[in-house]
Amino acid sequence: MILCTKTFGFSAAHRLHSEALSEEDNRVVFGKCNNPHGHGHNYTLEVTIRGEVDPRSGQLVNARLLETVVQQEVIERFDHKHLNEEVPEFRGVNPTGENIAKVIWDLLKPRLGECLVKVGVWETPKSLFEYAEEE
């Protein structure tokens, strides 16, 4: 079994705000990230897949195919967008790093199937959020 992780980048804005919290609680919990106008990040996305190496190509997956799937399902949807306002998957979902990782998983899983192992979203150089289904 081989694992392969590819990285991708996108830039997006978001506002951390929960309808389940009061305005004051949102300010306390999310601090400056609760700015009503939002704030932005240059995200790094890691997509990890697994499988057997194709004996003909020597590869786990066609790199161009994986890049096309991520481009169509994630980058085109998220890049240079305000996640709260422009991305339907975040209507009613607070776009925290944790939720961004889960939404990306849900977008990729139908196209990548069982070979998808994990999605990682670096929001800052110090903050990595990972989503993987339990086995």
Image (cartoon, rainbow, N blue to C red):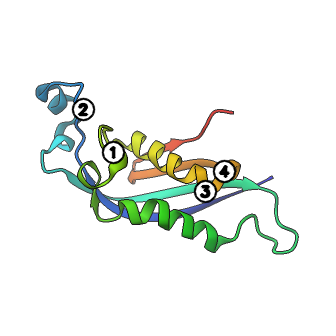
79 to the left or right of 101:
left
Q: Residue at x 29, y 52 (%)?
A: 83
Q: CA distance from mark 2 to mark 1?
A: 12 Å
Amino acid bearing label 1? Phe
Q: Quadrant of residue 13?
A: bottom left
47 to the left or right of 54:
left
Q: Are marks 3 and 4 in contact (CB under 8 Å)?
A: yes
Q: Which residue is mark 3?
A: 111
Q: Position of residue 103 (x, y in %)?
A: 45, 45
Q: Which residue is mark 2?
A: 18
Residue lying farthest to the right in this orientation: 55
Q: Are marks 2 and 4 in contact (CB under 8 Å)?
A: no
Amino acid bearing label 4? Gly
- On residue 113, the disc is 4
Q: CA distance from mark 4 to mark 1?
A: 23 Å
Mark 1, Cα crowd under 10 Å, few <14 / some 14-19 / many 20+, is some
Pick the quarter of the image with the C terminus: top right
Could you tell which of marks 3 and 2 lies nearer the N-terminus? 2
Could you tell which of marks 2 and 4 lies nearer the N-terminus? 2
Amino acid bearing label 3? Arg
